[in-house]
Image (tube, grey):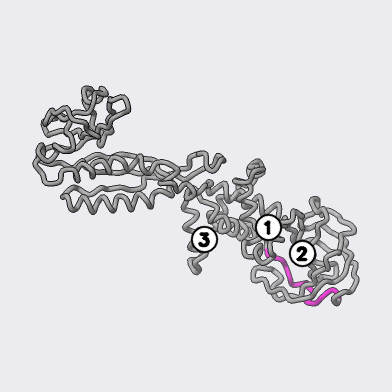
Amino acid sequence: MTREMFDIPSHNYAFLEKKVEKLNKAAAKLGCDPIEYGIVYSFAKEVEFKSNIVNIEFYKVYVTGSAPSLSGWSFIGKREPLEDGSAIVKSFIADSIPTELMDGHAIKCDHCKKNARRSFSYLVKNESNQFMEVGKSCLKDFIGHASPEKYATFAESLANIAEEFSGIDYQGSGSNAIPVVGLADVFAASAAAIMTYGYVSNTTSKESMGEKCATSSHVSELFFGKNSTLSTLAKHYDMVHGCVEYVKSLPDNSAFNITLKQIIKQNYVSARVFGYCASAMSSYIRSLTPKADVSSVVNAAIGNVDDKVVFDAVIMSLSRFESQSGFLTSAITMQTTTNHIVKMFTTSDTSGLGKGDSIRVSGKVGKVGVETYERSPYKGIVVTQMAHRSRILDAQPA
């Protein structure tokens, strides 16, 4: 019984399972011990993938199996010819093979000793540690079994598992390889994107017909984009642990929460779950923000639609997002000095503004409605949204 350790891309593991399942069916028919295998741990490795250097998730896999034995002889290797008439040895097991069988001599058969042209030969060993090189056609006479070549094929298949599945390309399926990123890096990138552009879910992005870029897309651009930079992530890693603990504390009352809890158990994740990570970080950041005191809020609009208004207000929240057309837009929620709640979207430079700052706004009332967003502190309160060309006249830092 030999135990080998292999590194294989995670996307090849399903193929490995199918291969071993097929081999174990053959082993059962031959009366051989089944092959055992499993994942020891996962890790990321930098590889060249589609002309880019990316991280690919790999599994450290163990495979345990025994070379089949017939009449006291076990298959340990195979000799294959080279163009110049010499031959190389492909070992089936970890046992050391004698030097005389590794010296490159032409393929031969120690059983019949005939000088025949052979495509390959098998190396076998008995319990007395005697080695023999036997041609395929002599296997039946030498071992005394109806179909010894089936045992030899099984032994060769067992030996080829590592070679077959260790590459990024599996039978031409390199497109199945999935780049991965460390979970902590994805959470830090999500925090960086949210702090810079505000949070935009994948659903909101789709509904905006691409005008609002999803936070997960910003995260993907950080890691896989041509002009990506990770320098902005450093100051956001301190939020990772808190976010993970926040996810752990969530109730198991939805498929979404359960999925998040499965994700945080991973060391590396692919872009397929960036949206989940961004959503988790957004929820965590909101949980850190004290709930707004709405006791003084006036539950009415600041004016009617198309009314021209000028007012002073304090910024309650400000987030930024970049549209697919490249415009950096700020979404501002504010409470006026008359205690009305007003929202506005502006492409003006708001880099020096933040929560608690005082501003003066001029423009037209765009629409009026009751806030319905479940997580908004102003849910159920009348909110006034300013029209598109409204602008900030003045600003005073808090």
Please check the rendered image and state whether residue 96 is part of the magenta-colored stretch, yes or no: no
Instruction: Indicate the amino acid at tag 2.
Output: Thr
Q: Which mark is residue 282?
A: none
Q: Is residue 133 visible?
A: yes
Q: Residue at x 80, y 54 (%)?
A: 350
Sequence-wise, the earlier of marks 1 and 3 is 1
Which residue is the site of mark 2?
A: 333
Q: Secondary structure at mark 2?
A: strand
The Cα atoms of the two marked residues, 2 and 3, are separated by 29 Å
- Check disc 1 and give the amino acid type: Cys
> Is 300 contained in the magenta span?
yes
What residue is pinned by disc 1? 213
Q: Are marks 1 and 2 in contact (CB under 8 Å)?
A: no
From this view, report whether residue 296 is shown above or below residue 135.
below
Q: What range is drawn magenta here? A: 291-303
Question: Disc 3 residue type?
Answer: Ser
> Badge 1 local density, few (<14 within 10 Å), some, or many (20+)?
many
Please name the residue that numbered disc 3 is placed on. Answer: 249
Name the spot of residue 69 as percent of width and height, x first: 15, 41
Q: Which is more foreground, mark 1 or mark 2?
A: 1
Q: Say which residue appears at 24% left-offset and 39% top-offset.
A: 2
Q: Residue at x 72, y 73 (%)?
A: 371
In the displayed structure, 90 sits above or below 320; it is above
Q: Is residue 290 left or right of residue 394?
A: left
Q: Position of residue 75 (x, y in %)?
A: 19, 37
Answer left or right for 369 relative to 101: right
How far apart marks 1 and 2 lie (CA) works out to 20 Å
Q: Nearer the viewer, residue 391 or 296?
A: 391
Vertical position of residue 25 compared to residue 56: above or below: below
| Upstream in sequence: badge 2 or badge 3 | 3
